[in-house]
Image: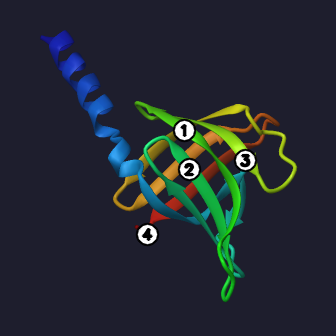
Amino acid sequence: MKNIIVCILIVMLFASFNTSDFKGVWEYCGGTSNGKVTPKPTAYTLHRHYTKNNYEAFVIEAGEKPFKYEAGDYTLKADTCLEIQSFSSQASQTLGIPIKYTYSISRDTLTFKGTLPNGNKVEERWKKIK
């Protein structure tokens, strides 16, 4: 009986992470990097647009056209998001390198947690706006 309950809980966990919840436009709300707070910027906003398997990231300043600074592919498995950057507007040490995050979605907030290839531990919070 215990095994059946555990199996049901595992299936529910896998089913609770839905790609359609992930798709949309998300705005950066702040986070931490190596334990230091990284607040939401005040001079501009950061948006990420997630489609079925791809993402694009934009800087948006008042009175300016959105500027795409990053793009790539992602895959979701249970509570893990694997991103591979395929475009960066600046020199990037993570271009083409898979980066694994754990993620969760609670109401309208997406939270990423992970360790970057340079060893920095990050946590980012994004609010769904579309």
Residue that mark 1 sits on: 74
For disc 2, the neighbor class at 10 Å (few under 14, some 14 to 19, many from 20) is many
Residue 34 appearing in the image: no
Task: Please tell me which of labels 1 and 3 falls first in the chain.
Answer: 1
Q: Is residue 7 left or right of residue 124?
A: left
For marks 4 and 1, give the CA distance: 20 Å
For marks 4 and 2, give the CA distance: 15 Å
User: Disc 1 vs disc 3: Cβ atoms closer than 8 Å?
Assistant: no
Residue at 33 percent across and 41 percent down: it is 18
Q: Is residue 1 above or below residue 14?
A: above
For marks 3 and 4, give the CA distance: 24 Å
Residue occupying the far left of the picture: 1
Residue that mark 4 sits on: 129
Task: Please tell me which of labels 3 and 4 falls first in the chain.
Answer: 3
Q: Is residue 30 left or right of residue 5?
A: right
Q: Position of residue 98 (x, y in %)?
A: 67, 31
For disc 4, the neighbor class at 10 Å (few under 14, some 14 to 19, many from 20) is few
User: Disc 2 vs disc 1: Cβ atoms closer than 8 Å?
Assistant: yes
Task: Please tell me which of labels 4 and 2 falls first in the chain.
Answer: 2
Q: Is residue 117 above or below residue 92?
A: above
Q: Amino acid at mark 4?
A: Ile
Residue at 84 percent across and 55 percent down: it is 90
**Which label sits in the foreground, 3 or 4?**
3
Residue that mark 2 sits on: 55
From the image, which quarter does the C terminus lie in? bottom left
Which residue is more in the foreground, 38 or 28? 28
Q: Amino acid at mark 1?
A: Tyr
The local secondary structure at tag 1 comes to: strand
